[in-house]
Image (tube, rainbow, N blue to C red):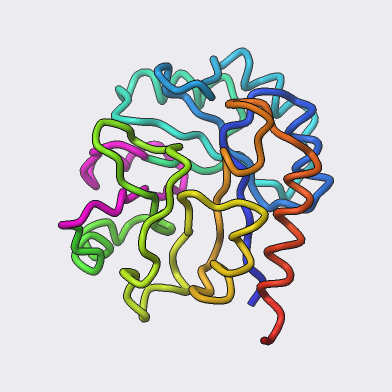
Amino acid sequence: MRIRVKVCGLTRAEDAQAAVAAGVDAIGLVFYPPSPRAVTPQQAQQVVANLPPFVTVTGLFVDATRESIAHVLKVVRIDLLQFHGEEPPTSCLGYGKPWIKAIRMAPEVDLLALHAQYQGAAAVLLDAYQPGIPGGTGSRFAWERIPQELRNQIILAGGLTPDTVEQAVRQIRPYAVDVSGGVEQRKGIKDAAKIAAFMRGVRRGEQPA
């Protein structure tokens, strides 16, 4: 199965175009003001203005109010919602959009139980855990913690780079991988060459050993 790829934390239209040119399946826009990769709805409009069809635009929110999410959906093309905070399942419903739930892999996390709890999600995204930081830490977690029966259903994130993604794909065979800091020049500014190298790593990982 082909591994899907999302590049998250885009802040510029040219970075979105570079991601599309490299063959990504989805881009991510961060609507969480404390993040160095955050965009306003107006900035997000510019990022997605010239995206072609069949590229999924993901809106990332962290414990946001229903009003703020509804406002973004009203003014920005968003195809998929990503909840990256402590949102219970009921808070993810009612927007008329498919959604994914990020799970930070803290030591005490029971992934099978959480996966069942968020069964309404299109998928769960697994990210590294760092106290007080909801995501984008650039760290990875122990991939062996992912139960074998869930590996082909999850989106793998956390510390992936052009140098590590091939190993991640070979070892886990996830449904998709998600990268942000691993393809940046600096926070919020992507590097087209790194995105292309990341995609090559994914494709190498797909090949039989």
43 vs 9, nearest the viewer: 9
User: Where is residue 110, by image quadrant?
Assistant: bottom left
Residue 15 appears left or right of 34? right
Q: Position of residue 52 (x, y in %)?
A: 79, 41
Residue 109 appears left or right of 205? left
Q: Residue at x 54, y 15 (%)?
A: 40
Q: Residue at x 20, y 56 (%)?
A: 107
Q: Is residue 131 magenta?
A: no
Q: If the image is split into quadrants, where does the N terminus sit?
A: bottom right
97 vs 115, nearest the viewer: 115
Q: Is residue 103 magenta?
A: yes
Whether residue 78 is situated above or below residue 147 in the rendered picture = above
Q: If the image is split into quadrants, where does the C terminus sit?
A: bottom right
Q: Position of residue 108 (x, y in %)?
A: 15, 57
Q: Position of residue 14 (x, y in %)?
A: 79, 28
Q: Of helix, strand and loop, which mostly describes the magenta segment?
A: loop
Q: Residue at x 80, y 30 (%)?
A: 50
Q: Residue at x 75, y 32 (%)?
A: 15
Residue 187 appears left or right of 82? right
141 vs 151, nearest the viewer: 141
Which region of the structure is painted magenta? 84-108
Q: Position of residue 33 (x, y in %)?
A: 43, 17
Whether residue 47 is situated above or below residue 207 in the rendered picture = above
